Each structure stands twice: as structure tokens, then as C-alpha cells.
Image (cartoon, grey):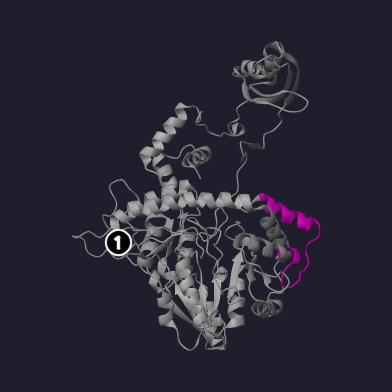
């Protein structure tokens, strides 16, 4: 497999891996790994290094909603311009162009339901090109970014086995 | 108390069997707090969910009965199809495939089917702990054939030839190897195959780690010219599909060998558990992508581990398969067992002494990298500290003998460090 892909896969799984560790794992000199990572950061392939948090564990008040938005594509730029306008709002955490009954899937996060409702009413729905919205509040998160929220599975293996 | 009173009634062969050298370290590690274990011979991945779900679905549907002795026909067909696809070897599901309770049972059956009292079985070492005892239980005489780190723990046809006698009946091969991780390149296996053909040996090839081959393709012994019918090929689900606890393996071979093994199996085990067979079927049909992901992860860790050992001054040859590294610890002046015991007591890291896998494993330890990168990193930090204390310099003599009342030799720790955590 391409070394760059290997490095990205490793970082995507655990962004706390150090360059020296990655270097050993992909069989490259550490300096070369640092250079590849720097290039990937510079060309925006690596966009950020994040931590997955189960916010329920610390009692942080947080409401997430999926908003289905129907929009009118614009000549020459299609959905791009409206998507960028929507995406620039800091309340919008994820944004996807969809096939099917609606166009944009907008994941919005706020402290309360009222925050989210305000965002839809005052920021999203009035945008030129947005022809309608349907809001679904998330009741509970079970899995995010491929990680199951919860206590995980214990290591039940014997401490020593042949 | 009747301890020992009835020992005289025991089968002398069983009485003479040595308990596994691992047992003592298991007890020690199990009672040590804060232990990081690199002594585990099974993947750290839980069985993929779709496989577990297939088992649950099977139970819901009432799959709770015996199956055909040789295994469910659908599973045998799938095993034959998988083997043809992966290895290019064709076996007839109806009489050349036997589903067993893990490769351990398959090995026992193969030995009991082939070995007559007094027959000698060549057992290249280091090797899995059950090879010698199972040979003895079958009435055979295990003949260890040591391999050496200088040759990457590969076995040479020359070494095997020197161990041959008129009583030699079979050869037991395990590559990729537990505990060393060694693999055999095709030309060297072909030389072994020529010897087996010339001396009419039966080959029992334990290839449970076949899918965990990292540099190049696995070479299946049964796939070498003329070896298919001479070889009993043992495979299973434990390692590559992370299914150790399900206890499903299989044997492939000519109908005479497999028929004989099936006869013993039907009188002893009857059949492998039906729900495990259903899970195995799902693993073969839909588990390839997940298996490849796990193999890739092992390969990353393998490089990390080998580098870590070499960096701390314990020479470690590059294992081509399985999930074990087998570093040389002789520079510490400690025996394998001393090293292992002190490492558990002083740094709370568990590994397995190399001599548990045969005398030629003395001076080595087996270190499993079926552990998270975080645990591996912390374990190597501790081991590095440990090795620094014991590495023999020109001015130092033999390490201080272990005092059971002290956790570390006097003065071994720097100020402020504590061994008891």
C-alpha cells in the first residue's frame, strides 16, 4: 500500500501517534514521515487532529439536529455556493449533499433545542435558495465516526496463553 | 486429602508428561496488579460483529443440535471453496475435509491417526507447546530438531535428514511459526518436500497462522509438487478471524487420512459445536475484508515491536508471520525464565520464556504484539528500563540473583522510582 495512505490511516485511527512510532510502523525514516505529514497538512489533506468525546459523560448540555434542507441549485455553481454559505455557520457541524427527497443534510449543534430552532428560523430557512427545511432532533447518540459510545468491550483474554 | 495417592493408577505416559512451562508465569502474571501482558497467544480483536450475529441468529433459528461428524456440509463446501481460492488446492468436501474443535483437536487426531507406538515424529523447535505431549500421548516418540536464530528460525532439510531413523514416520511443521514468527521461503520448503518424498514421510502442516503472513505470499506445504496427498493440512479460524474461543478448526488431506481422523473424532468429540460452525461459515463468506484489516494492523505493530527490541539492545530478527516477536535476551545474562519472572515482578510486563517452546528457545522470549499500540509503547518503556538494569557490561558480572523478598536488585532503580505499583 502507498506509504502516504498508510500514514493517513494510522493517523485517522489515532492522531496521538508520534512520527517516530509511525516511522517504525510504515518502515520509513522519521524525518521522511514528518515531511510527508507536513506536506499533507500544508495541502489540506490533513485538516485537523480531533478527539472523540462522549459529552454525556461530563454532563455537557448539547443538542444535535439533522436538518433536511431543500435548496435550488444555482446556474454554474450548482449547490456549491449555497452549501458554502450554510457551512460557514459555526453551529453547522456536518454538511452533506444528498440524493433523494432533499438536497442538503445539515447537522447542527446547539446548547438547547431553542438554540437549534433559532438557527433554523433565523439563519438557515431565510437563505436565498433554501426552499424548505425539516428538523429532526437527535435523541441519543450510539455511535459516532465508527466509535461506539459506551464502555467498550473489556479485554477478556487470559494474561498468558500459549 | 488424597493428593498423590492415586497417581500410581495413572497412565504412565500421562504421569510422565511435563506440565506446560507457561503455567507458572500465568499464575504469577494473573496475581500481579497493573500488568501489561504481551504473553497472549490470541488476537486482541474481538470476533467481528457480523460473525457474532450469525451465531446469535443461528441460535434463534434453533441450531442447537449435533451436526454431521465431519462438520456441516455447507461449512465443508465453503472451506473447500476458500482453500481452492486462496491456495489453489482442491479438496472434496465429502471426504477430504474435517471440521474439528480447533486446530488443537485436528493436530491430536492427525497424530493419533498416523502414529503407531514407537514411531518417531520430527518436531522442529521452537514450536507450539502441545506438539511433543500430543505425540507422546499418541504413542509416538517426538524427535526435536532445533532451529537457530542465525538461520531466522527456519528449518533446513539437512537438519531434518540428520534426525531421521528407520522409525521416522512423520514431520510436524508450523510456519508461520509460534513462537518465533518465522516463515519458510519456497525453495527451502521444496527441499524439505523432496526429503519427505524420498523418505516417505507423512507431513502434518499446522498452518493456523497462514493468513498472517506479511512479506509476500504464504507458501502452503500441501501445495508443493507431490505434497498434497502426503500432507495433512491444519487450518482454523482462531487467529486470522479472531475466533479463538469458538474452537473451530479443520483438517484437509487425502480421504484415507481424513477418514481415519474422522473415525477418532466421531468416537471422541462427535462434532464441533453447531453455533460455532455457523459463525465460521459467516466468517468465510463475509469476513475477508475485516480479516485483512486486522492483518494490516498486526503488520504495523510488528515493525514497531521489532524496532523497539533492537533499539533497547535485544536483537530481534524480523518475523515474517504470526503475531510474535522472539528477541534474543542473552545480553542480560538472565535465563529466559529468570528474565520473564523478573520482568513481571519488577516492571509488571508479562512475556513468555522462549524455552517453554523447546530447549533451543532458551535465551529468547516470546512477545506477542496482539496488544494496542498504547500498551506496547508503555510495555517497551518498562522493558527498556529493565534491560538497562541488567545488560551485562564489560565491568559487570552476572546479574544479582532474584531475592523473592525484594522486587528488584539492590540499587537497581534510580532515585524516586518505585518498583511496586
Residue at point 48% right, 71% down?
B190
Residue B125 placement (x, y as % from top left): 44, 72
Crowd band around label 1 with a 10 angstrom C-alpha radius: few (<14), some (14–19), many (20+): many
Left or right: B331, with A108 as reference point: left
Residue B247 image-quadrant placement:
bottom right
What segment is highlighted magenta in the picture? B49-75
Residue B197 visible in the picture:
yes
The residue that appears at 19% across and 60% down in the rendered structure is: B394
In the rendered image, which quarter contains the N terminus of chain B? bottom right
In the rendering, at what x and y percent does residue B222 appear? 57, 70
Q: Residue at x 42, y 39 (%)?
A: A18
Q: Is A28 in front, or is B128?
A: A28
A14 is higher (above) or lower (below) than B216: above
Badge 1: chain ID:
B
Tally of numbered discs: 1
Q: Which residue is mark 1?
A: B332
Say whether residue B67 is magenta: yes
- Does residue B22 sit above or below B167 in this rendering? above
Amino acid at each position: 500500500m502507498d506509504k502516504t495512505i498508510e500514514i493517513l490511516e494510522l493517523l485517522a485511527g489515532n492522531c496521538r501517534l508520534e512520527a517516530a512510532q509511525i516511522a517504525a510502523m510504515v518502515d520509513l525514516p522519521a524525518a521522511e514521515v514528518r515531511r510527508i505529514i507536513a506536506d499533507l497538512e500544508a495541502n489540506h489533506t490533513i485538516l485537523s487532529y480531533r478527539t472523540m468525546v462522549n459529552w454525556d459523560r461530563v454532563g455537557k448540555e448539547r443538542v444535535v439536529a439533522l436538518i433536511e434542507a431543500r435548496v435550488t441549485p444555482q446556474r454554474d455553481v450548482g449547490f456549491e455556493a449555497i452549501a458554502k454559505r450554510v457551512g460557514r455557520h459555526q453551529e453547522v457541524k456536518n454538511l452533506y449533499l444528498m440524493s433523494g427527497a432533499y438536497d442538503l443534510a445539515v447537522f447542527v449543534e446547539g446548547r438547547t433545542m431553542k438554540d437549534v430552532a433559532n438557527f433554523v428560523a433565523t439563519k438557515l430557512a431565510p437563505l436565498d435558495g433554501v426552499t424548505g427545511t425539516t428538523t429532526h432532533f437527535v435523541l441519543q447518540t450510539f455511535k459516532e465516526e465508527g466509535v461506539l459510545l459506551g464502555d467498550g468491550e473489556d479485554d477478556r483474554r487470559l494474561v498468558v496463553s500459549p | 486429602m488424597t493428593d498423590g495417592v492415586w497417581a500410581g493408577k495413572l497412565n504412565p505416559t500421562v504421569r510422565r508428561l511435563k506440565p506446560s512451562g507457561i503455567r507458572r508465569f500465568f499464575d504469577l502474571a494473573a496475581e500481579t496488579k497493573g500488568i501489561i501482558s504481551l504473553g497472549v497467544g490470541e488476537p486482541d480483536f474481538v470476533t467481528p460483529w457480523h460473525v457474532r450475529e450469525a451465531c446469535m441468529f443461528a441460535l434463534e433459528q434453533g441450531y442447537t443440535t449435533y451436526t454431521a461428524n465431519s462438520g456441516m456440509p455447507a461449512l465443508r463446501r465453503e472451506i473447500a471453496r476458500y482453500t481452492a481460492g486462496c491456495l489453489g488446492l482442491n479438496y472434496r468436501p465429502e471426504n477430504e475435509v474435517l471440521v474439528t474443535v480447533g486446530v488443537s483437536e485436528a493436530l491430536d487426531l492427525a497424530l493419533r491417526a498416523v502414529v503407531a507406538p514407537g514411531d518417531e515424529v520430527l518436531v522442529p523447535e521452537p514450536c507450539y507447546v502441545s506438539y511433543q505431549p500430543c505425540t507422546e500421548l499418541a504413542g509416538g516418540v517426538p524427535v526435536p530438531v532445533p532451529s537457530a536464530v542465525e538461520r531466522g528460525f527456519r528449518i533446513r532439510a539437512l537438519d531434518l535428514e540428520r534426525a531421521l531413523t528407520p522409525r521416522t514416520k512423520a514431520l510436524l511443521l508450523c510456519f508461520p511459526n509460534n513462537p518465533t514468527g518465522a516463515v519458510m521461503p519456497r525453495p527451502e520448503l521444496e527441499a524439505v518436500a523432496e526429503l519427505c518424498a524420498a523418505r516417505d514421510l507423512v507431513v502434518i502442516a499446522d498452518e493456523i497462522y497462514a493468513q498472517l503472513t506479511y512479506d509476500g505470499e504464504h507458501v502452503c506445504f500441501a501445495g508443493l509438487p507431490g505434497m498434497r496427498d502426503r500432507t495433512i493440512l491444519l487450518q482454523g479460524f482462531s487467529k486470522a478471524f479472531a475466533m479463538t474461543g469458538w474452537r473451530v478448526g479443520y483438517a484437509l488431506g487425502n480421504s484415507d487420512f481424513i477418514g481415519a481422523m474422522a473415525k477418532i473424532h466421531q468416537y471422541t468429540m462427535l462434532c464441533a459445536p453447531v453455533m460455532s460452525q455457523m459463525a465460521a461459515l459467516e466468517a468465510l463468506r463475509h469476513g475477508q475484508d475485516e480479516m485483512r484489516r486486522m492483518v494490516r494492523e498486526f503488520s504495523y505493530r510488528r515493525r514497531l515491536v521489532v524496532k523497539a527490541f533492537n533499539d533497547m539492545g535485544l536483537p530481534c530478527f524480523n518475523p515474517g508471520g504470526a503475531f510474535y516477536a522472539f528477541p534474543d535476551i542473552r545480553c542480560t545474562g538472565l535465563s529466559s525464565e529468570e528474565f520473564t519472572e523478573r520482568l513481571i515482578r519488577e516492571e509488571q510486563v508479562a512475556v513468555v520464556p522462549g524455552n517453554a517452546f523447546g530447549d533451543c528457545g532458551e535465551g529468547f522470549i516470546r512477545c506477542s504484539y496482539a496488544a494496542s499500540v498504547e500498551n506496547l509503547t508503555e510495555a517497551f518503556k518498562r522493558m527498556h528500563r529493565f534491560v538497562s538494569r541488567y545488560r551485562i557490561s564489560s565491568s559487570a558480572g552476572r546479574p544479582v540473583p532474584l531475592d523473592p523478598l525484594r522486587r528488584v536488585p539492590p540499587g537497581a532503580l534510580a532515585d524516586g522510582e518505585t518498583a511496586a505499583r
